Amino acid sequence: MRQLGVLNAVIMQLDLEMRDENPMYDGNWLGPNEIRRDLRKLGILHETIVQALQFLSSPFIDALEEHKGRYRLVGPAELVAARLQSAMKSLQ
């Protein structure tokens, strides 16, 4: 359950960046350091965020794009959630 919470937090942070009118980087890209800084109150370790980003950008989920160590959503957070649910169902 904790890992699902981390995935959700990372997705929500990337979604906030995608909807931000003044994103940190052109194209709404965020790296693990920026995400960790934004989620620091949750106490999520850097390595855990990196693992979540790698999982979400893997061909299995394909919910994030990666470019030079930064990530962004491939579509709305709802699409990402649907992909995760589909992947979880296929594992059951």
Image (cartoon, rainbow, N blue to C red):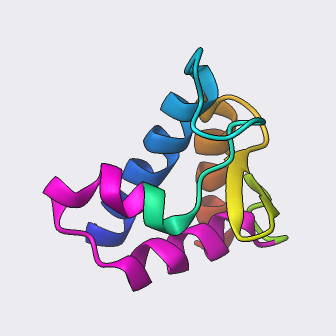
Task: Tell me residue 40's x, y (percent).
Answer: 22, 59
Q: Is residue 62 left or right of residue 83?
A: right
Residue 33 position in % (x across, y down): 45, 67
Quarter that holds the C terminus: bottom right
Quadrant in the rendering for residue 20: top right
Question: Which range of residues does the magenta coloring cover?
Answer: 35-58
Nearer-the-camera pick, 47 or 60: 47
- Residue placed most toward the observer, 16 or 8: 16
> Which residue is rendered at x = 65% and y = 75% of the image?
54
**Quadrant of the snapshot with the N terminus:** bottom left
Please report the residue visible at 42 percent of the width from the left and 85 percent of the height from the top: 47
The residue at 17%/67% (across/down) is 43
Residue 38 at what x, y percent from top left?
33, 49
Q: Is residue 30 above or below residue 26?
A: below
| Residue 37 within the magenta-colored segment of the rendering | yes
Q: Position of residue 84 (x, y in %)?
A: 61, 54
Q: Is residue 66 left or right of residue 82?
A: right
Residue 70, image quadrant: bottom right
Count of picture labels? 0
Q: Main secondary structure of the magenta part?
A: helix
Instruction: Give yes or no for residue 3 being in the magenta stretch.
Output: no
* Residue at 53% from the left image edge and 80% from the top image edge: 51
**Location of residue 54 with respect to 63 vertically, above or below:** below
The reply, left or right, for residue 53 in relation to residue 1 is right
Residue farthest toward the bottom in the current orientation of the protein? 47
Residue 59 in which image quadrant: bottom right
